[in-house]
Structures are given as structure tokens and as C-alpha cells.
């Protein structure tokens, strides 16, 4: 509960065990790393559009640097942006508030989790500047390329990168234990399993999937580190090892990882569209069960990444079928969101625009995934820019669109002030429109046969026709435009922190518990602990009427 004793800056903001401070630490680290990841993308997109020319703010890109740029862009965006923002940042900040308790059940474990994550962030950034340059073996780190400095040319970069990724996993493992235990044990009186807000459920399911999938990869990463540093041959065929073993270990984690970040993103979208359409979430229980189903099925699809790696064709058929099956629950959730919108009184505020854009853009990612999950078509499209376009249509909605939906939706709660709505909308359109111009051309380039991870197409006459090169330039120019619009967001964000219009407790008239706490919530969150009764989301804070449940909202 609220404490009044004086705290120094260090104990309050750096070594705090308050879930909100730790959440903000994750959030701001994730946003900073987002800028780093975006800068890397800018550099290699410039190289693809104008090969060999000096890139402003960077210089000439060498082939080895190109590999390092692409590798670290991927790793940073997934492990240091999507995960810390969607799960660790928002999860930490909002789980205790949304289930009506005063903190995580393991506050010091929580602090340790962020400290390990911070160390991993320092290491991955340092790995870019060591002699030999950053690791360039792709974010999937396939051996034998990744296993020996002889091939990957980065005697320091590769092991540092691997240690950073492994530490990052440890940090999220600790976070996951905390989230699941807190939600199991610390809910407000009356909040049964079916009264837990859907975002909280999604983070819990994602944490379980993460914890169950990451073990084999950490073990595999340690074996890879041994190959790199101590001359073992777990993955090196020359010494009797098997490079395919790494692919299995990697994707056994790597595919569930997609759902680890997708589920919280869907949770954010669900919270936002219910509030801004003034409707109850359609089919709450069905969404919950399908989210569990998704989590389970996600463990049986991994080999769809290995159709061209020489796996048994019967196994390829099996993994095609499971991959097609997993699209069913995701489609079902999308329909439930559309049904939630149906008949609602929809308000197009900035968070709602982001949530609706998520549904539209993610749909393109989902549908194009079918061609890659089916082994017959994947054999042609594998490792082409079609894949790059496809996963950016899934990951960009997850990490960026849902991220902005969450930041704009919860900003008044976190900081007690409103962001500027006009700037928010300018930023929205300035992001969504160029986004499609960055990635739609890549579907065409991929179908034309353009392979990924190639530093320049100048020497491939069929891939360097004016038509295809113009598409590369279009994608790059659109990316630069999109990145420039991010400064509108940064300006709006920072300005609103200090000068935004003051926000009351529940400015959106939402009906989840975090809106019953003051904005921003004090240490200890609630002056009087809330009680939940009847139906999902419905809550009561002693002495306060139930104003905000849809049937109570004046029409
Ligand atoms: Cu996959």
C-alpha cells in the first residue's frame, strides 16, 4: 500500500521494485531500441536502393556490414522491441492494475529481470562495435555459418550476440514466472478466471508458451557458443555434427515466439476496440479458449521453416496441415473483433485507428502466410522477399501498430496527461500509408525471384531490371517517409509528458480495473482495494457506482 517515506532518485527510478517503474524501464528501453533497429533498416534499405553509394549518417556499406545490419535489425526488433514493449513493459505496468492488486508477487525477481535485460541490451549494442564488426549470420543464426569465426568473420560479434540473446531469454523467463504467479494468486476479490481482462490473459498465455519453448533454444545456444569458442562440433558436419539440429531447436522456439508477441497484441486490440465501440467483447470465452488452442498448436508447426532443408516430405505434409490449422483460431479471433465492432457506437480516437489498422494489416500478413506454410508453394517462395514482406505484415502490426495502440490508449493512465489527438492522427496516417508502400513492393520482388540477405542485386541481370529496381527505390523512399513521421510521435510523446492536457481517472470511460486507480497510479496503486462482481470486467471500488459498463453508458 501507499508509503510516504522519502526515496532517493536511485531507489525510486533505477533500483525500484515497483511494477510500474520496471514497466516504464522496459518500455523506454524498448522504444530506444526501436530507434536503433529502425536506423539499421534505414541504412540497409538505402544500400538496396542505391547500391554502393554512401548512406547519409552512415557511409558506404560493405557486404559484411550489410549482413550485420540485417541480422541485428531482426534480432533487435523482435527481442529488444516487441518483447520488452508488449510483454515486459505493458505486462508489468498493467497486470497488477488490471487485476486489482498493488504489485507483482515477486518484486525483486522483477527488478532482477530488468537488470539482466539491461545487461543484454548493453551487450547487443556493444557487439556492433567490436573488432570484426557485429554478428552477420542472420537473426536465425544458422550453423555452420554462425558456428565458426572462420565463416562469420566476427570472432567477438558472434559470441557477444549469442550471449546477449541468451541473457535476454533469461530476463523474460523470470518475467514470465512473475506474470503467471501474480495472475494466479493476487487478483482482486471476486475476480474469477472469466473476469480477467483479455489483455492479461493473453500475456499469461504468451508467458506460458514462451517458458515452454525457450528451454531447448537456450540449451542449443549454449551448444552453439561451445562450437564458436571451444571447438566443439555440435552443428558442424565436418566434425560429425548436424546443422539441421539447430534449425529444429531454433524454430521449436521461433514459431511459438510469433504467438508470444501476437497474443498480447491481440489482447491490446481487444481492449481498445471494446472501449471505443462501447460494446462488450464479443465471445470472450471463445477468444480465450482459441488463444489457448493457438498456444498449444504453435508447438506443432515449426518445421514449416525447413521445407527446403531436406526434411522427409511426409513430415513436410504434416507440418503444412498443422500450419493451415493454426490459421483457424487466429481467423476466429479476428471475426470476434469484427463482431464486437458490429452495432457499436464507434469513436475514431487515435488508439482506435491503430486497433482497426491492426486488423486490416495483420490480415494481409495472415493470408500471405498460407503460401509459405504450404510446402508446395514455399519451395519456390522460400527465403525470397515474399517471406520478408509476409512477416513484416505480421510483425509490424504486432510490434508497431499494436504498440502504438497501447501507448496512445494507456498514455493518460501512465502519465496523467493526454497526448495531442491531431498530432496522433497525423502520425497514424504518416505511418500506415508509407508502411504499405514499403512492404507491398517486396511481395512483387519476392515473386520475381529476389532472394533475401543479398547486399546488392547489381550483378543479377534479371533482378536488376529498371522495373524491379524502381520497386526497391519506392520501398526505401517510403521507409524514409515513414521514419520521418515517427518524429511527430516522439515530439507528441515528450511534449505531452510535460505539457499535455491533464487526464482524469477514466478519460475513455473504460471498464477495466486500471481505470479505477488515479492517473498516474501512486505507489501501491489503489487507495482502497477494488472488488469485482458479476460478469467479465465489471468492478466496483468501494463508495463508487458502476458508471462505465456499457449498459450504463448514456446513449
Ligand atoms: Cu513459423
Image (cartoon, helix red, strand yellow):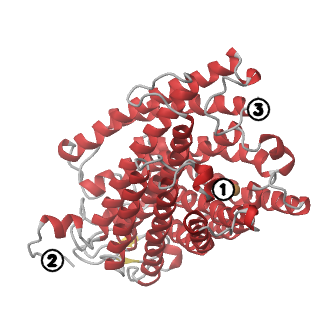
Q: Secondary structure at mark 1?
A: loop
Foreground residue among 387 and 242:
242
Image coordinates of residue 428 in percent, x first then y, are: 44, 35
Label disc, if present, on residue 468 of the rendered structure: none
Residue at the location (72% across, 34% down)? 446
Label 2 near ligand 1 (CB < 8 Å): no
**Which marked residue is nearer to the observer: mark 3 or mark 1?**
1
Image coordinates of residue 304 in percent, x first then y, are: 77, 56
Seen in the picture, residue 393 relative to 524 is either above or below; the reply is above
Q: Residues within 10 Å of mark 1 (few under 14, many from 20)?
A: some
Of callouts 1 and 2, which one flags the residue occurring earlier in the amino acid sequence?
A: 2
Reading the image, the residue beneath label 3 is 449
Image coordinates of residue 439 in percent, x first then y, are: 61, 33
Q: Residues within 10 Å of mark 3 (few under 14, many from 20)?
A: some
Label 1 – label 2 distance at C-alpha = 51 Å
Residue at the location (70% across, 29% down)? 445
Label disc, if present, on residue 142 of the rendered structure: 1
Image quarter in which the N terminus is found? bottom left
Q: Secondary structure at mark 3?
A: loop
Residue at the location (46% across, 31% down)? 482
Q: Residues within 10 Å of mark 2 (few under 14, many from 20)?
A: few
Image coordinates of residue 424 in percent, x first then y, are: 36, 37
Amino acid at each position: 500500500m501507499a508509503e510516504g517515506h522519502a526515496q532517493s532518485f536511485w531507489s525510486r527510478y533505477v533500483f525500484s521494485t515497483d511494477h510500474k517503474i520496471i514497466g516504464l524501464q522496459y518500455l523506454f528501453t524498448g522504444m530506444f531500441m526501436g530507434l536503433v533497429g529502425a536506423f539499421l533498416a534505414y541504412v540497409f534499405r538505402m544500400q538496396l536502393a542505391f547500391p554502393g553509394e554512401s548512406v547519409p549518417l552512415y557511409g558506404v556499406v560493405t557486404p559484411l556490414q550489410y549482413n550485420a545490419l540485417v541480422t541485428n535489425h531482426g534480432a533487435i526488433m523482435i527481442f529488444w522491441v516487441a518483447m520488452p514493449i508488449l510483454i515486459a513493459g505493458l505486462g508489468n505496468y498493467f497486470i497488477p492494475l488490471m487485476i486489482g492488486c498493488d504489485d507483482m508477487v515477486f518484486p525483486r525477481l522483477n527488478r532482477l529481470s530488468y537488470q539482466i535485460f539491461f545487461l543484454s541490451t548493453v551487450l547487443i549494442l556493444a557487439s556492433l562495435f567490436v573488432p570484426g564488426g557485429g554478428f552477420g549470420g542472420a537473426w536465425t543464426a544458422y550453423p555452420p555459418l554462425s558456428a565458426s569465426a572462420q565463416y562469420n568473420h566476427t570472432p567477438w560479434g558472434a559470441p557477444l550476440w549469442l550471449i546477449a540473446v541468451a541473457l535476454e531469454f533469461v530476463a523474460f523467463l523470470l518475467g514470465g514466472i512473475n506474470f503467471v504467479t501474480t495472475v494466479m494468486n493476487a487478483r482482486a476479490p471476486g475476480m474469477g478466471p472469466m473476469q480477467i481482462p483479455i489483455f492479461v490473459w493473453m500475456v499469461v498465455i504468451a508467458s506460458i508458451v514462451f517458458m515452454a519453448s525457450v528451454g531447448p533454444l537456450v540449451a542449443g545456444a549454449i551448444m552453439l557458443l561451445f562450437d564458436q569458442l571451444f571447438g566443439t562440433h555440435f552443428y558442424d558436419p565436418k566434425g560429425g555434427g548436424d546443422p539441421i539440429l539447430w534449425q529444429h531447436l531454433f524454430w521449436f522456439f521461433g514459431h511459438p515466439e510469433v504467438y508470444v508477441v501476437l497474443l498480447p497484441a491481440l489482447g491490446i486490440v481487444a481492449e481498445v476496440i471494446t472501449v471505443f465501440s462501447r460494446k462488450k467483447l464479443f465471445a470472450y470465452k471463445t477468444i480465450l479458449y482459441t488463444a489457448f488452442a493457438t498456444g498449444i498448436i504453435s508447438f506443432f508447426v515449426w518445421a514449416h521453416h525447413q521445407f527446403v532443408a531436406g526434411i522427409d516430405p511426409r513430415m513436410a505434409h504434416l507440418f503444412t496441415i498443422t500450419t493451415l490449422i493454426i490459421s483457424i483460431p487466429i481467423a476466429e479471433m479476428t471475426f470476434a473483433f469484427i463482431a464486437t465492432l458490429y452495432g457499436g457506437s464507434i469513436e475514431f480516437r487515435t488508439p482506435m485507428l491503430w486497433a482497426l489498422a491492426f486488423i486490416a494489416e495483420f490480415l494481409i500478413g495472415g493470408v500471405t502466410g498460407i503460401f509459405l506454410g504450404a510446402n508446395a508453394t514455399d519451395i519456390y517462395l522460400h527465403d525470397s522477399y515474399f517471406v520478408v514482406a509476409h512477416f513484416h505484415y505480421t510483425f509490424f502490426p504486432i510490434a508497431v501498430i499494436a504498440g502504438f495502440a497501447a501507448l496512445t490508449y494507456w498514455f493518460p493512465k501512465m502519465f496523467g496527461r493526454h497526448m495531442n489527438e491531431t498530432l496522433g492522427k497525423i502520425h497514424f496516417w504518416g505511418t500506415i500509408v508509407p508502411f504499405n508502400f514499403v512492404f507491398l513492393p517486396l511481395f512483387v520482388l519476392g515473386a520475381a525471384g529476389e532472394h533475401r540477405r543479398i547486399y546488392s542485386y547489381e550483378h543479377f541481370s534479371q533482378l536488376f531490371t529498371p522495373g524491379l529496381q524502381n520497386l526497391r527505390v519506392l520501398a526505401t523512399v517510403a521507409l524514409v517517409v515513414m521514419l520521418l513521421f515517427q518524429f511527430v510521435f516522439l515530439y507528441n510523446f515528450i511534449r505531452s509528458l510535460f505539457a499535455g492536457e491533464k487526464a482524469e481517472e477514466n478519460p475513455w470511460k473504460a471498464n477495466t480495473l486500471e481505470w479505477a486507480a488515479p492517473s498516474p497510479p501512486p505507489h501501491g496503486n489503489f487507495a482502497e482495494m477494488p472488488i469485482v462482481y458479476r460478469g467479465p470486467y465489471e468492478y466496483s471500488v468501494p463508495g463508487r457506482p458502476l458508471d462505465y459498463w456499457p449498459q450504463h453508458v448514456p446513449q
